[in-house]
Image (cartoon, coloured by chain):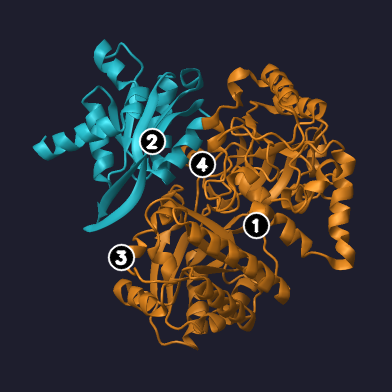
Chain colours: A cyan, B orange
Amino acid sequence: MNRRQLLLRGALLAALAPVVRASGVESVDAAGEGSSAPVLAVHDPAYRRSREFAAALQERGARVIALEPDVLAAWHQVLRAACAQSPAARITGLTTRSDFMVLSSLARSAGLSPLATRDADASGELGGVRRRATLIAWVLATRNQAA
Amino acid sequence: MERVLPPGMSAAAFDKGLVALRGVVGAEWVLDSDEDRDTYLDPYATGNAKAHAPSAAVAPANLEQVQAVMRVANAHRLPLWPISRGKNFGYGGAAPRLPGSLVLDLGRLNRVLEVNEKLGYCVIEPGVTFYDLHEHLTRAGIALEFGVPNFGWGSPVGNALDRGFSFRGDHSSSICGMEVVLPDGSVLRTGNGAMPGSAIWATARHGFGPSWDQAFVQANYGVVTKMGLWLHPVPEQVISVQVALDAQDDLGWFVDEVSPLLMRGVLGGNIAISTATNSVIDSSQRQEWYTGPGALPDSVVTRMMAERGMGWWNGTVRISGHEDSNQANLNRLLSAMGRHTRREFQVSRASGASQAARGPVVTRLKVLNWFGGRGGHVGFSPVMPASGAAVLGQFRRTKARYDEHGIDYNGTFYLNGRSVTNVNLMLINLDDADHSARTQRLFDVLVSDASAQGYAEYRTHLDYMDAVAASFDFNDHALRRFNERVKDAIDPNGILAPGRNGIWPSAWRNQRGSE
């Protein structure tokens, strides 16, 4: 990790602290591997902030999953099975609003609800062209955790 | 969002109803936190978000729970708004017409009950998604497929019940047999399903006596808990012809040449032809093309065409079937188009199996990033006769209105044979109140323009259901009066989807035209 990444990850964690806390990664880190509910950190590879946010959570014990080839496939091929295997799992990410909308809707029938959300402006890059999109940081958790 | 109650209902009365619902489905499946409510809002609402805000949601797991929920709703006068997966985006999403309604979320009824490869049908529950069905067919090696719409993450049942369509055509025409919970909680099976143990429920449509399947489409007479849907055999081969037409007026001859081929069965399903903008909005952002005032100028669209090698109109004509007949049908298509243009069309061939193996995607949702920031979309979708002159007239009127309101024009015409459905996608910059307001004004004027031509929408947003229904006013709204007589007869307390598509039960009729 270079210095720029270190600074960006630190800034993201600070700015999105409520979401980070709600994700439970710190408790995973503190309690040691395997002793707490898993945290799945998803990211949109098109957005640097999204990647770095997931990477920062990975350093704290989260499992990182890219939304590839798209969010629908990621849910059906990876996330749904992971939630079935660990019903207390939490899913978190810094993604576009549309991806959050899709995921929160799909996860609803698996008993997951939004636990925390926070807006975060970010720019992305695809094909060498810079783009602006409003990203949102969020946590999905089982309803008893959300209550 | 804070809780919005049904009009005139006290919090105490509403809470009593929730307690009863928790007794039916379990406390965890009555969803009434602010965050829960937010997920059922129309994410693209341009006006007052509370106008269609749900009070809560209830998610039953099976038929018996759906029946029990209906009984509780009657006892407590709770209006319910059923959704399959709630993906009716552009038309209101999962949000109810009447504010304060409880969303009846059928997402947990998600079983594929039967697939018959030989006879080409499935029987599924409303919570099954396009992806689930695709996965089921693929894993079992069943050579059948179902058309998937552009935003392919919803429910085939829900989509068919809203007359959604794909390149395979109108999905409501694939319906064959339903199980329906009526507003009083009783269960009905339509068509041949009314005969216990019927061997032809999902293969022969009409049964004996009146056919009721279509009466539950775009209506509020019952909650569909099972549906038979005809699937399509995977074709031996698919030929794809990339059509690019350079001039705006080329749309006219294209409609006149291709529609007869659809009517004669040379081509199947429907054929979509879209503006060049439609091809760039999910793979670039507006600021890369234009940062000036008003709508995208035609000169910018010309630049898009040049940079991306597109025409003003672009589409893919699919020819599906056996290899020998496909080639003959391709020749007919190329000959018809060759009468009007010397342009070469790119033709590719693939096995039907390789096409069917592609799963549904939601990449099209990237259109929401067109402006950057918070994006939304609504669709204005009138239907007109399959005549080049009629379609060109509709295009010119609509584009002029878009330009007048400073909104980027983005239209697709779906050729169905005898009719053409024009889906106008309006991308909204939700961070710009003026843009949202202009979009609303544009929508109003388009509804009025289309009505003047004798064209109505095939489906519309919650905000416009009353207005569109009101345009079907032959003999002093005879159809609406009939719809509402039926509604009052089977739903005297008006608990099921009040106001859906302009059908208001007497209990809530004073809400017609409400925001």
For image coordinates 31% across by 32% down, the residue present is A16
Residue bearing the label numbered 4: B137
Tell me the mark number nearer the camera, choosing from 1 and 2: 2
Identify the secondary structure beneath mark 2. Answer: strand
Q: To which residue does mark 2 refer?
A: A118
Parent chain of label 4: B
**Cβ atoms at labels 1 and 2 below 8 Å apart:** no
Q: CA distance from mark 3 to mark 2?
A: 27 Å
Q: Which mark is residue B460?
A: 1
Disc 1 is attached to a residue of which chain?
A: B
Q: What residue type is disc 3 on?
A: Glu
User: Residue farthest to the left?
Assistant: A2
Q: CA distance from mark 2 to mark 4?
A: 39 Å
Q: Are marks 1 and 3 on the same chain?
A: yes
Residue B18 falls in which quadrant of the image? top right
**Mark 3 lies on residue:** B288
1 and 4 marks in contact (CB < 8 Å): no
